[in-house]
Image (tube, grey):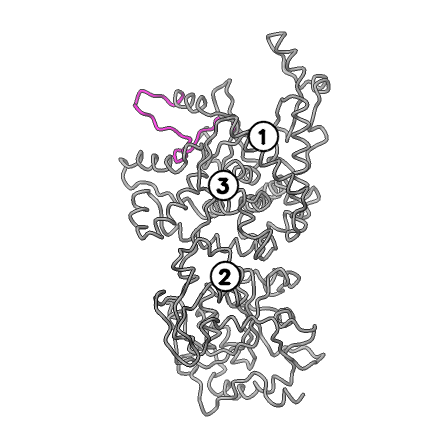
Amino acid sequence: MVTRNAVTLLKTIDALDPWEELTELGLHLLDLPIEPRLGKMVLYSVVLKCLDPVLTIVCCLAYRDPFLLPSEPGQKRAAYMVKRKFACDTYSDHMALLRAFQAWQKAKAEGHEHSFCSRNFLSAATMEMIVGMRSQLLGQLRASGFVKARGTGDIRDLNSNSEIWAVVKAALCAGTYPNLIRVDRDRQQFITQKETKVRFHHSSVLNKLPLSSKQTVAHMRKQIVAELPCDWLIYEEMMRTGSIAHAHCCTLVTPITVAIFSGPARLPLDALHEPDQAHLEGYMEEEDSEDDSKYDNQKAMFKIDDWISFRVEPEIARLVLQLRQKWHALFLKRMHSPSKLLTQADEAVLRTVVGVLIAEDQALNLQQPSGIGQRPRPLVMDYCSPVHLGRQMQSSPNHNTSFYNSSAAYSNSGLSFFSDEQSGISGSCSSASSYNPAYGNCSPRTSPMSHAFNSHSKLEFPQSNIGNSRIRYFIIKANTSRVVEVSMAKNIWAFTPTTERKLISAIKEGRDVILIFSIQGSGHFQGFARFTPHISDHRPPEFRSANLGSCYQIEWLKKANIPFQSTRHLQNAWNENRKVQISRDGQELEPTVGESLCQLIVKGQPQPIFTPDCIKTNRRHLGYCRENFPNDSSPVSRNQMQWDPQNQVSASWYDSSCSAS
């Protein structure tokens, strides 16, 4: 039963076709680490160009409600009023989530996060988690080709309509379908396709608290129905208590939004019934008045599914149907080719849809809050040097007395995926960063990464037709670009205990270990390095986290900036045949896939990068490993992992025998 219901839902949202095969939409939903309905919201927001607000709302729904229950019964009304304040009279719980997140980020930037959360009944830990989830989702969208680094299709372009609440509601409506509520004004109640007794959850801003004990539930319900300006709402989930169903996280939407964005992409053949046809097939209801009956006979029936239908003027019904067809054709086109730019005709369709949504909201006098499309503030620690920003660089033969420009360094290094996030950083942080003593050998106008991502640099590898199974490949995830910069400058890295055990185990087997680096949320691979069992004497602040082990010496073999889009054809058989970019820290790659990924990073011809001759260098390690790493299953101690300087081999990955070949 559960499986059948899940398959039915996937068919309803167009993730599966009638033969239960994945559609273009379904393939992209597989790449997003959230529920299919929430993933559909995100993809619709990409095409509608309102990505940021929808991304925030989706992360709140995917994790948990950031609003806390009051600890004291007397604070219940205060918590309700706080949520109403964030909703801005939009009849929307989703708006309350969005504005609460934006206000929290502002309070955090101003240094009074704790008092803000306490005063507004918010969980700071939940907000921090939402920030991380946003980064992960945005990185996956970059990897899939929906978000480009710059130009048309970049993060700014995909937020062109983020300030328009009507457009944001359209994306939410597309994702929440079939979770729709209709207002039955004749019976003064709310109904869904399966429920006839629906109430708003007590935490919803659409629910009303009684002002006195004399107000009954029926009276409150009638008051709520009378205040709603239109008859359709979306909801996130339904909770049943006895015979009453409570709708959680609701938002009021206009009829035109439901008509265009809800339902399947392909409507049934009988979707539009002209007046005569509707009358003959019994869709017209008998009326007491002859005039009313005559007027209704002139209307057409526009059906979305077996439950959602509209009775409108025939010309309006035809126009809505045409606009709906053009919109869904545009959406399917984007799903088929995410990285393809929109044509002028596509842009015209999008402008028409946005104009219709705005006009409908204005006709119903719905509120349009300002500032909902503001870009979230990136964490300063991800982009700025930890040393004081105003400190001037010290004079030396290699340094002039100027300031180190972090923005220029990132731009020169090829880390263009951060350029569109830096707009939210304060001027003092984005304009200049001070000289960092860790980069003593770097020019003031370049960072260690600026040389690393030089597209003209090439690595030459001996050719061989023999595959190499003595190399093991691991994906390493970095939290920020800062730690990668330090790693490239110092040739060190600190691993989590789980990853460290995997690497040491590979070394004990006499294998060579290649580490392929990717910054979390960047949508790129930054290069690959060779792991050595040296424990470094230096431990910079970036590697002093409590969940990290010792700092090991590594050898960077190639530093590049390869987008995930160019590696989508590589699937890791050791990770359920998922794409290589969908990997956790320490995920091992199947050897042929790892070698192919390294070849892409090197940008060389399709030839084996590491030949058996090159492995001769590392056989020197094998004797040391057998001596210092006993062949038992006992944990490896820190003393066992210390490298003997007398047995230390050349730091170069390739020795003379490799070069001679």
The residue beneath circle 1 is 256
Q: Secondary structure at mark 3?
A: loop
Q: Is residue 199 magenta?
A: yes
The residue beneath circle 3 is 163
State if disc 3 and disc 2 touch (CB < 8 Å). Answer: no
Picture residue at 70% right of the left edge, 19% below the top: 275
Picture residue at 61% right of the left edge, 36% below the top: 353
User: In the displayed structure, does residue 274 sit left or right of residue 4?
Assistant: right
Image height of 109 relative to 509, above or below: above
Q: Earlier in the sequence, mark 1 or mark 3?
A: 3
Residue bounds of the magenta highlight: 195-218
Majority secondary structure of magenta residues: loop
Image height of 217 relative to 323, above or below: above
Q: Earlier in the sequence, mark 2 or mark 1?
A: 1
Quarter of the rendering occupied by the C terminus = bottom right
> Could you give the CA–CA distance between mark 2 and mark 1, rounded to whole angstroms?
39 Å
Picture residue at 39% right of the left edge, 49% below the top: 105
Q: Earlier in the sequence, mark 2 or mark 3?
A: 3
Q: Amino acid at mark 2?
A: Gln
Q: Amino acid at mark 1?
A: Ile
The residue beneath circle 2 is 520
Looking at the picture, how far across and down is residue 277, in whole percent? 73, 20
Q: Nearer the viewer, residue 388 or 201?
A: 388
Looking at the picture, how far across and down is residue 419, in whole percent? 51, 58
Looking at the picture, how far across and down is residue 174, in whole percent? 57, 39
Q: Residue furthest front?
A: 401
Query: In this rendering, which labeled residue sits more in front, label 1 or label 3?
Result: 3
> Could you give the CA–CA distance between mark 2 and mark 3, rounded to whole angstroms?
28 Å
